[in-house]
Amino acid sequence: MKTLFDKIWDAHVVTTVADGPTQLYIDRHLCHEVTSPQAFAGLRARGLEVYRPGRTTLTADHNIPTIGQDQPIRDKVSRFQVDTLAKNARDFRLTYYGLNNPMNGIVHVIGPENGYTQPGMTIVCGDSHTSTHGAFGAIAFGIGTSEVEMVLASQCILQTRPKTMRINFEGKLKEHVGAKDMALYMIAQLTTGGATGYFVEYAGEAVRNLTMEERMTLCNLSIEMGARGGLIAPDETTFSYIKGREFAPKGERWEQAMAYWQTLHSDEGAQFDKEVTFDVSQIGAMITYGTNPGMGMPIDGTIPRLDEIDEAGKISFEKSLKYMGFAPGEKLEGKQIDYVFLGSCTNGRIEDFRLFTSYVKGKKKADNVTAWLVPGSWKVRKQIEEEGLDKILEEAGFALRQPGCSACLAMNDDKIPAGKYAVSTSNRNFEGRQGPGARTILAGPLVAAAAAVSGKITQP
């Protein structure tokens, strides 16, 4: 009896070092401009080619601007990184989706939307949120630059086998509560280190009822509680999402793939190293109040008081609140905000834009709010326009930007100014993550929409 994780891992073992790591074969390798330059330089220094170029796909996302992509990138460092990625793609004959390519977008958005991401695969990228792809029943995890070089050179990686955890979400979600709220609730309960050393399988009625894009949001945030990755058993929802996408199997190959994919589930009675169950009826619309994703609470909740924090965590708790300008025991509902960011590999897909638009339709953006609405890819942007969402957003006072990682992280022009509050649908609220001195409040698309219209933290 095996878990889903065990089945996929065991099928990809090449060799195992006694009392050491496993040599694991990698099916799909994704690269962006930030973590790959030194890896390619390493190949050149050793006179090596990319072993299986058809297994590696490159896209520019972290450093690119989200306005004026038809112009040269103004920031010299960003331009150099993107130019270097393009050169590496040419030199090593790799598929590359650069600026203005209709396939360009955030690495964890373009993998699924083009059918690169499939059940039963091992998928890696030099990016911690690679866990997103686990939504398809894949073992997907982030790797370091030296490991990027290892995969380019050999299509394999050395990894220590993680422990397994199953997190069950049972029951039915309340209205206006979604996958981002589930994730922030889970991390608040388990803490940012609560899944360290584990690969997590998400299961239960509430998970089965999620769409593929919601499942991606949940798996995306696995890393924020210390997990190596997260995955969900593929089902009819998964198969119907993949079918017909450009790089998905076709015809007879589809039938063969389906025969295998349908075996990808944890066997009845399979043992996990740890198991946790949450009742989703207890989850409300969530926000964060501190400087890590585990510092989350319901919108109508209050920041914990100092006597509720254990002694070991008091200093970091107080430091975090000082940075945010909040106080222990404070309520945040009704607090004025300055920026709203809709986008990132967590919430930059078409469903996130539909949700945001459904709330702001017929309303107006608050005058005190600067809103950055950034599709996760050109395909998402095209779909927004085809569905007429851009017109509804425009009437409400919002403007669409061009695809990219944008204000998720301060590596491009979209930086939140120091001291300003941003309600953000991204994945991290660390000090300076969205710009030096920026104050980030993580939330889902509906909460972001409510904040954009009211100008303050508001129940959707």
Image (spheres, rainbow, N blue to C red):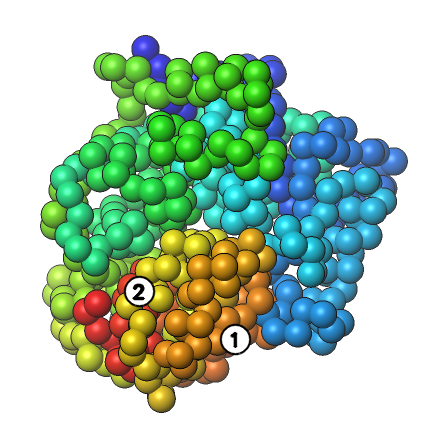
List the single residue furthest toward the bottom.
367
In the rendered image of this protein, does residue 307 appear above or below residue 197?
A: below
Q: Earlier in the sequence, mark 2 or mark 1?
A: 2
Location of the C terminus (image quadrant)? bottom left
- What residue appears at the point 45 percent right and 14 percent down from the top-left corner? 259
- What residue appears at the point 79 percent right and 48 percent down from the top-left corner? 88
According to the image, label 1 marks what residue? 415
Q: Camera-side residue: 143 or 98? A: 98
Element type where label 2 sits in the image: helix
Q: Position of residue 196 (x, y in %)?
A: 37, 40
Is residue 233 visible to the viewer in this orientation of the structure? no
Element type where label 1 sits in the image: loop
Answer with left or right where residue 199 lies relative to residue 321.
right
The amino acid sitting under disc 1 is Lys
Q: In the rendered image, which quarter is residue 395 located in?
A: bottom left
- Estimate the spatial distance between the alpha carbons at disc 2 and disc 1, rounded to whole Å: 27 Å
Circles 2 and 1 in contact, beta carbons < 8 Å = no
Location of the N terminus (image quadrant)? top left
Q: Position of residue 156 (x, y in %)?
A: 64, 27
Is residue 246 visible to the viewer in this orientation of the structure? yes
- Numbered tag placed on residue 267 in the rendering: none
In the rendered image of this protein, does residue 33 appear above or below residue 11?
A: below
Answer with left or right where residue 230 lies relative to residue 254.
left
Q: In the rendered image, which quarter is residue 360 located in?
A: bottom left
Q: Position of residue 429 (x, y in %)?
A: 39, 64
- Within 10 Å of disc 1 (Cα), the crowding (few <14, some 14-19, many 20+) is some
According to the image, label 2 marks what residue? 358
Answer with left or right where residue 13 lies relative to residue 163.
right
In the rendered image of this protein, does residue 304 appear above or below residue 156?
A: below
- What residue appears at the point 64 percent right and 65 percent down from the top-left corner? 64
